[in-house]
Image (cartoon, helix red, strand yellow):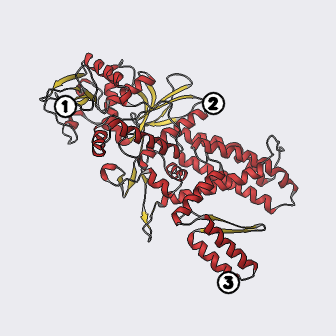
């Protein structure tokens, strides 16, 4: 296990903070997951990506990581949507959770080690609420309809506001504070919501039938799987207040004061559409499935990694003349991913059979630079990720490797009579390939065999054009026949027609090949 030099921007201290695991060699991470009443949008994908890169980076350093990401399957939004669809709430939530997991897997995100659901942890939630009542941090109120709610007493926690840097008196005047006549203080928030209607959605508890409030679930499930305190808590910056602030208040009130709920808090920035946060409440969201219909999921991952996780990222959409929606940033990212897969194939071909071959101590100037890059690339990537998961810098290292790899392959093809180049290049390619793969693994990119990637992207692009591969094959064959007959005017016309469709022709000594370019 290499020395851990990772520093993360801690939202609590607002400084770069070294990650010092509470248990040597182990890192415990909790991430707030989805409320599963609908399919996931691009913002949800970005929220899952930062902890995914963190987990990959830590594991590459030899640390044992326990990664917990919850599923909120008990929520008023789920109840409302289930009522609209005439579906049991937990059935709707389970269906949406399965779609979420599929979408995150397509994005290349690792499955969490534990993915707890609220509905399966009601006993832990009730026990935590009872503990808060026992220590005077929560209280029960009787509602006019006979139900009983439990509320957290915000002023009982002296550190309230320390994460969001909000003053408690200023919060009292905030319009977002829910007003319930029976509450002791406008700031107090619900831990348990009682219900009295026959057949209402809920569970039995010491306060009668009801269901948990939103914030208590994460405190209970984090404690259940990671203990009273853990290393890193992740989530979107929109959760800092009130959700994460309330998690801290609940958790630290129920546990000894010298045990902080989380050592480091990391929060990803917004995905913006027309300078506004992408959100279902604003109706400006683009689902992951919308993107996957038009572009490869790896392209979206590359696009999201191209901006530091803490900063905002603009997700632009444009509409073509044919009415087709295009995501320009993702289109450009897919071109880059195409290039990287092509580079990987060229490197694999050149480096085949060169494993274990030593290089001489002295190399020609051009080849020496390649060897140095191959030796230092992985360390450069690790250093960039050690500085608050700086994926844009890591991608720049990846670009350097790809450039050097293609230049090496081109050099071999140009200098076929240069014995030194021909003898040394395969071993250099092998070293570049190892650096390339190590970088890709840390970023979660190009984890699919090149052939499978090409097959799926070509099928998608043809589908968007409304073309069958047989139809393109026929046009390419027609062009080949025109070339054979020396009818170059017709050949050029056919090529121009294919170009206009986004189909690129490559003529080789053994025949013509084609591929659909990204558009």
Q: Residue at x 39, y 39 (%)?
A: 34
Where's residue 510, x and y in %? 78, 66
Label 3 neighbourhood size at 10 Å, few (<14), some (14-19), many (20+)? few
Q: Nearer the viewer, residue 417 or 105?
A: 105
Residue depth check, mark 2 versus mark 1: number of the one nearer the observer: 1
Taking 132 as reference, is 320 left or right? right
Where's residue 155, x and y in %? 23, 26
Residue depth check, mark 3 versus mark 1: number of the one nearer the observer: 1
Question: Is the residue under label 1 in contact with that under label 2 (CB below 8 Å)?
Answer: no
CA gap, disc 3 to disc 1?
79 Å
Label 2 neighbourhood size at 10 Å, few (<14), some (14-19), many (20+)? few
Q: Residue at x 47, y 55 (%)?
A: 291
Taking 252 as reference, is 344 left or right? right
Taking 209 as reference, is 163 left or right? right
State the residue position of label 3.
489
Q: Residue at x 27, y 29 (%)?
A: 202
Please tell me whether mark 1 sits on a helix, a strand or a loop: loop
State the residue position of label 1.
197
User: Which is more N-terminal, label 2 or label 3?
Assistant: 2
Q: Which mark is residue 2?
A: 2
User: Which is more N-terminal, label 1 or label 3?
Assistant: 1
Question: Is the residue under label 1 in contact with that under label 3 (CB below 8 Å)?
Answer: no
- Furthest toward the top, the residue is 134
- Furthest toward the left, the residue is 144
Residue 252, picture quadrant: top left
Please tell me whether mark 2 sits on a helix, a strand or a loop: loop
User: Which is more N-terminal, label 1 or label 2?
Assistant: 2
Q: Residue at x 49, y 50 (%)?
A: 304
């Amino acid at each position: 296990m290499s020395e851990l030099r990772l520093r993360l921007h801690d939202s609590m201290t607002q400084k770069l903070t070294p990650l010092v695991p509470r248990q040597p060699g182990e890192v415990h991470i909790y991430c707030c997951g989805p409320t599963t009443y609908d399919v996931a949008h691009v913002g949800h994908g970005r929220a899952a990506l930062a902890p995914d890169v963190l987990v990959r980076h830590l594991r590459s350093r030899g640390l044992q990581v326990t990664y917990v990401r919850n599923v909120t399957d008990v929520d008023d939004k789920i109840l409302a949507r289930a009522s609209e669809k005439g579906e049991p709430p937990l059935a709707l939530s389970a269906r949406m959770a399965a779609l979420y997991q599929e979408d995150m897997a397509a994005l290349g995100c690792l499955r969490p080690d534990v993915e707890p659901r609220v509905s399966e942890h009601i006993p832990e939630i009730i026990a935590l609420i009872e503990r808060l009542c026992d220590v005077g941090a929560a209280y029960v109120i009787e509602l006019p309809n006979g139900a009983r709610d439990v509320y957290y007493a915000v002023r009982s926690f002296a550190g309230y506001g320390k994460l969001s840097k909000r003053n408690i008196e200023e919060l009292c005047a905030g319009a977002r504070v829910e007003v319930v006549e029976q509450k002791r203080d406008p700031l107090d928030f619900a831990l348990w919501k009682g219900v009295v209607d026959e057949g209402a959605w809920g569970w039995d508890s010491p306060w009668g039938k009801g269901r948990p409030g939103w914030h208590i679930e994460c405190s209970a499930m984090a404690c259940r799987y990671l203990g009273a305190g853990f290393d890193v808590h992740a989530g979107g910056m929109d959760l800092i207040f009130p959700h994460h602030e309330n998690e801290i208040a609940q958790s630290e009130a129920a546990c000894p004061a010298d045990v902080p709920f989380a050592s480091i808090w990391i929060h990803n920035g917004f995905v913006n559409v027309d300078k506004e946060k992408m959100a279902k409440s604003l109706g400006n969201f683009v689902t992951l499935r919308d993107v996957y219909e038009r572009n490869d999921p790896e392209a979206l991952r590359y696009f999201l990694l191209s901006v530091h996780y803490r900063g905002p990222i603009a997700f632009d959409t444009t509409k073509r003349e044919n009415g087709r929606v295009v995501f320009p940033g993702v289109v450009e990212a897919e071109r880059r991913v195409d290039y990287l897969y092509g580079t990987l194939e060229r490197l694999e071909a050149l480096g085949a059979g060169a494993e274990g071959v030593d290089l001489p101590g002295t190399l020609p100037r051009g080849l020496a630079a390649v060897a140095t890059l191959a030796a230092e690339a992985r360390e450069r990537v690790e250093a960039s990720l050690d500085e608050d998961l700086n994926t844009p810098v890591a991608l720049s290292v990846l670009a350097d490797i790809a450039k050097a790899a293609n230049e090496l392959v081109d050099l071999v093809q140009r200098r076929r009579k240069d014995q030194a180049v021909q003898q040394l290049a395969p071993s250099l390619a092998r070293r570049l390939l190892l650096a390339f793969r190590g970088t890709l693994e840390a970023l979660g990119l190009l984890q699919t065999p090149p052939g499978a990637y090409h097959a799926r992207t070509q099928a998608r692009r043809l589908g968007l054009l409304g073309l069958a591969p047989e139809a393109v094959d026929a046009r390419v064959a027609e062009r080949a026949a025109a070339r054979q007959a020396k009818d170059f005017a017709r050949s050029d016309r056919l090529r121009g027609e294919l170009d206009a469709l986004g189909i690129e022709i490559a003529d080789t000594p053994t025949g013509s090949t084609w591929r659909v370019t990204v558009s």
